[in-house]
Image (tube, rainbow, N blue to C red):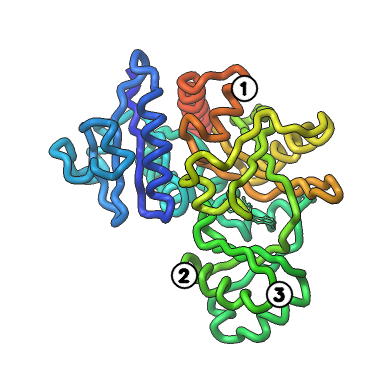
Amino acid sequence: MIRLGIFFGGRSGEHEVSLMSATSVINAVNKDRFQVVPIGITREGKWFFYDGPVEKIEDGSWQGEPEMTVVAGLGSLKERIDFALPILHGPYGEDGTIQGLFEMLDLPYGGCGVTGSALAMDKILAKTVFAQGNLPQGPYVPVIRDELEQQQEVVLEKIERTLSYPMFVKPANMGSSVGISKVKDSSGIKDALKEAAKHDRRILVEEGINCRELETAILGNFDAKASGVGEIVPSAEFYNYQAKYFDGGQSKLCIPADISDEIAEEIRSIALSAYQLLDCSGFARVDFFLEKETNKVYINEINTIPGFTRFSMFPLLWEQAGLAYPKLIERIVMLGYERYNAKNNR
Ligand SMILES: Nc1ncnc2c1ncn2[C@@H]1O[C@H](COP(=O)(O)OP(=O)(O)O)[C@@H](O)[C@H]1O
Ligand SMILES: [Mg+2]
């Protein structure tokens, strides 16, 4: 029996999303093969083994339950789990930091390693690497917060010289659309930069693309495969935090997306290149924009720990490809062991 440490919560702005994803994963894990060891991380970054009811995770009421015990030191982690599965979104979960800890502990874990996680989380670095691989992407301007504070006019001039409105202003390291604004004209740009700067020292400004949003799911290490392509139809003007998680199901997922076979194939192929360029492994979801006027495909980003509820795109795409949710989790664990063994030359 593999003791599967499932990490949930975390210090990022996507804490709640993780609670939803992890609840689905914990419920679905094949209990004949795995003993689940849930490990909750509070918003403040405190770690607890949590043996209480799974239903209390999603609404946060697991905190304060009697079945919580402090994770006292790194040794106790290795004593209680064989394999780590971080179901954490955003910084300190999806960005290579906790993956680095697992490496130090010599613990096999699910998903991307340190480099892949860090590169995919940082929207500026990911774009730089995508450009090296000649992957199609829209125009953008990276901005450093210090530069913004010291030379705001120079920064604004550069942005407006390089890009046209509407623009999207984003913290470089975030997710779930936290801190992202769509800016229609120059009257909104300063506030948008200020908002993004609250979340990160580095900011990305992108030209807005009038687009459909398409996503594909990747699974595998050296021989990774792409699933079919799904489409997101947001309930809001763009796919913001509210539309992603709290719109009562008004945002629609369309699987498979209603696009030509050629475009689907192009997306899958770019997705696999991007996955390899960033040194991803295990699994990830790669997101695209399809420009409405031109049918041109642009890569947007790689999510190395995508939403993982039963209604999320990543598991639904694999379900459509014939891999049911519990099997998908098993496969992710096996891929984690495979990478661990390859890295350690076993
Ligand atoms: N350049 C762009 N053009 C059009 N829409 C965009 C652009 N950038 C972001 N968006 C919208 O904002 C959403 C969130 O942006 P994204 O870069 O995917 O950040 P996150 O990592 O938070 O998901 C996208 O799903 C899309 O709806
Ligand atoms: Mg996104």
Residues at badges 2 and 1 in contact (C-beta under 8 Å)?
A: no
User: Does 79 sit left or right of 94 as displayed?
Assistant: left
Nearest to the observer: residue 32 or residue 96: 32
Write down the residue under mark 2.
Answer: 198
Specify the quadrant of the image occupied by residue 266. top right
Residue sitting farthest toward the right: 294
Q: Amino acid at mark 3?
A: Ile
Query: Mark 1 and mark 3: span between their CA atoms?
Result: 42 Å
Q: Position of residue 313 (x, y in %)?
A: 57, 34
Write down the residue under mark 3.
Answer: 159
Q: Which label belongs to residue 320?
A: 1
- Residue at the image point whose x is 71% and y is 33% from the top: 257
Q: Nearer the viewer, mark 1 or mark 3?
A: 1
Nearest to the observer: residue 124 or residue 280: 124
User: Does 296 sit left or right of 166 as displayed?
Assistant: right
Label 2 crowd bin: few (<14), some (14–19), many (20+), radius 10 Å: few
Q: Secondary structure at mark 1?
A: helix
Sequence-wise, which precedes: disc 1 or disc 3? Answer: 3
Nearest to the observer: residue 252 or residue 259: 252
Q: Secondary structure at mark 2?
A: helix
Residues at badges 2 and 3 in contact (C-beta under 8 Å)?
A: no
- Residue at the image point whose x is 65% and y is 68% from the top: 183
User: Does 181 sit left or right of 290 as displayed?
Assistant: left
